[in-house]
Amino acid sequence: MPFSQIANSIGASVTLQLNAKAAQMRAAGEPVIHLGGGEPKSKAPQSSIDAGVEMLKSGEIRYTPASGTAALKDAIISYTALHYGRQVERANVIASAGAKQAIMVALMALVDPGDEVVYPVPYWVSYPEMVRLAGGNPVAVHPADGSFQPTVEEMIEAIGPRTKVVLLNSPNNPSGAVFDREFLAGLIEYCQQEDVFVLMDDIYHRLVFDGRHPVHCYDCTDYSVDDAKLLVLNGVSKQYAMTGFRIGWAVGPRDLIKTMSNIQSHQSGNPCSLSQHAAVAAIEGDQDSVSQLGRQLEQNRDELVRLLREIPGLEVDIPQGTFYCFCNFRAFDEDSTRLAAYLLDKVQVVTVPGIEFGMDGYLRLSYCGALEDVREGVRRIKWILDENGSPELAVGDTVFTR
Ligand SMILES: Cc1ncc(COP(=O)(O)O)c(C=O)c1O
């Protein structure tokens, strides 16, 4: 069957494939440790559950405006005032089925066939495929110093006449790095002059550690929300542990938001009305669960980094946010796909190969699960990578052999 060129250019999601494989192994009773996950294991806030149940019981689950309800837009307006210090209007806001859809409709609104979208390495696995789906060409910028943040000059060098969008994610999946003010301000100023839109994927912006307050894009420009070439992407998935609700949003200039809303209206229509209602309750309700999640993740991070640093040869940068740690395993294997497969096969630990994020030789380890899983996962990795270790490792009734 001759599929379209775009379809043929899109690969399957490796992370989802890994999730499926881990679920399969678990179902077969195998003691899999999943360090490949991308969602907090805590419960959605009680306020969101109550609101959802109440609406469901009413039996009135209808279409809403394609770009979201007035109530959700108002909650996002308050959120933007609180976290970004900017007063926006409903016309500056669109709610979508997850930040993922908001990014996708933004790319469809901005990118013509052959246009380029520039982003730093390492990047979220979906970016290149989303750019291709929008008909564009992905351009990944590798920091020459091997760090997780390129220089402004490196980014500018990659921006050419066909560049329409620069896509940034901080705190970053997979590295956990938080981009600094100099980088953001320099890049935002350049893009403003050159008419290039900066898409700020802030989905992890409240999941930061060590008392950090990440710099946000509106701190880096004096332009109004309508005049700045900025679009901020956010959502309830990570901070409120509401991944399955599928509610994300974008805040930006009203002409861009209107165009995105037109696209979304024909693509999917409104994000699920029940989920929108639940998201309002989460955003406007008690925020304790967010700080609690942050504390738990920080504790997991500390333990993970401490244990990983006991493995000779492994290079570990401390993540400043998110729930991922991106480690340099090149001393063991330059081929991250092979190494991830080896760890799954030998000790049943799921990790995500760095090549999927643009950096081979690295693995992404998630610490969004239980602390015991973090400890057990690293115990197994340490054992299998130690050539001088014992020939067997017992895990309950299972015995792993080299
Ligand atoms: C960097 C980044 N952006 C966006 C998303 C998508 O979030 P959502 O669940 O709101 O679609 C993810 C999810 O893993 C992510 O890691």
Image: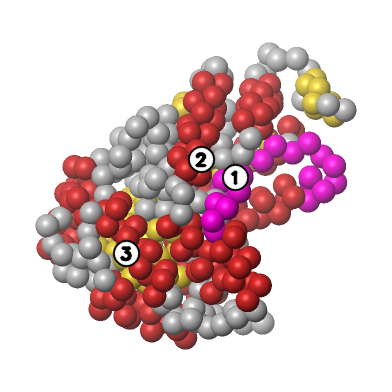
Graded by Cα atoms within 10 Å as few (under 14), some (14 to 19) or many (20 or more), the crowding at tag 2 reads: many
User: Residue at coordinates 66% horizontally, 72% vertically from top-left?
Assistant: 57
Mark with earlier residue (2, 1)? 1
Magenta segment: 24-48
**Residue indicated by mark 2:** 293
Q: Is mark 1 within 8 Å of ligand 1?
A: no
Left-right relation of 393 to 371: right
| Residue 261 image point, x, y percent | 38, 79
Q: Is residue 397 left or right of residue 232?
A: right
Q: Quarter-wise, where is residue 235 in the image?
A: bottom left
Q: Specify which label sits upstream in the sequence, 2 or 3.
A: 3
Q: Is residue 75 above or below residue 85?
A: below
Closest to the observer, 327 or 341: 327
Identify which residue, 328 or 101, lies in the foreground.
Answer: 101
Q: Residue at x 42, y 29 (%)?
A: 318
Magenta span has 26? yes
Residue occupied by mark 3:
77
Identify the residue position indicated by label 1 in the image: 42
Residue plotted at (53% across, 64% down): 278
